[in-house]
Image (spheres, grey):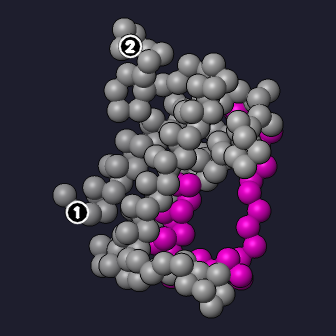
């Protein structure tokens, strides 16, 4: 199996878990945040939904320069829009990755803010970093949902809300 095929398989597996988590996000709690330094539930869930688009960015560009790329997060007003946004980003990321040549994964990609370089890594490493970001922020989202008494789905097995696990 090629690296691209392995990455696509992993993307598909993580997407199933991510979508289940996003489905549980209650629109009426979008403004809730557990701490003043935390994102709101809406912002965190939207970030989780946008992360599959980073795969497209990683394989179709050579860098992200915050100084030259204004960022405005997508605005979603309900869970249905959140899921639509996730699905669009997943399709975009998956299509870009499936069209990528194996050798592209070894090309350098840079994260910077003007002259300040934060990271230089291969495009393949950036794709993997995007996956890690999805898992990381999805776990944060699980904590937010738990604090709101929203039953959370299992990620790599059942959660405490499913069956006789705990």
Report which quarter residue 115 is drawn in: bottom right
Instruction: Look at the picture and state if 16 lies above or below 43.
Output: above
Q: Nearer the viewer, residue 2 or 67?
A: 67
The range drawn in magenta is 51-80
In magenta segment, residue 60: yes
First-in-chain label (2 vs 1): 1
- 45 part of magenta stretch: no
Q: Quadrant of residue 157?
A: top left
One can see residue 91 in this view: no
Disc 1 element:
loop
Specify the label residue 166 is tagged with.
2
- 95 horizontally vs 143: left or right: left
Residue 68 visible in the displayed image? yes
View extreme (top): residue: 164
Q: Residue at coordinates 19% horizontally, 58% vertically from top-left? A: 1
Quadrant of residue 144 in the image? Answer: top right
Image quadrant holding the C terminus, namely top left
Q: Nearer the viewer, residue 36 or 12?
A: 36
Residue at x 58% of width, y 38% of height = 141
Residue 44 in the figure: left or right of residue 128 = right
Residue that badge 1 annotates: 2
Q: Where does the image place residue 128, in percent across and percent down from the top left? A: 39, 61
Residue in the picture at 63% in, 19% down: 149
Q: What x and y, as percent, mark residue 145?
A: 61, 28
């Amino acid at each position: 199996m090629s690296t691209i095929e392995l990455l696509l398989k992993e993307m598909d597996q993580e997407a199933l878990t991510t979508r289940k988590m996003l489905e549980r996000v209650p629109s009426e709690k979008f403004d809730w945040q557990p701490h003043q330094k935390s994102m709101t539930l809406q912002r965190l869930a939207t970030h989780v939904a946008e992360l599959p688009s980073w795969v497209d960015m990683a394989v179709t560009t050579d860098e992200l320069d915050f100084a030259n790329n204004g960022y405005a997060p997508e605005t979603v007003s309900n869970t249905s829009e959140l899921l639509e946004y996730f699905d669009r980003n997943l399709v975009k990321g998956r299509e870009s990755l499936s069209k990528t040549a194996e050798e592209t994964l070894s090309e350098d990609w840079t994260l910077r803010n003007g002259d300040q370089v934060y990271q230089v890594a291969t495009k393949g490493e950036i794709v993997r970093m995007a996956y890690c970001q999805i898992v990381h922020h999805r776990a944060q989202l699980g904590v937010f949902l738990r604090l709101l008494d929203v039953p959370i789905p299992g990620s790599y097995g059942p959660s405490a809300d499913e069956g006789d696990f705990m």
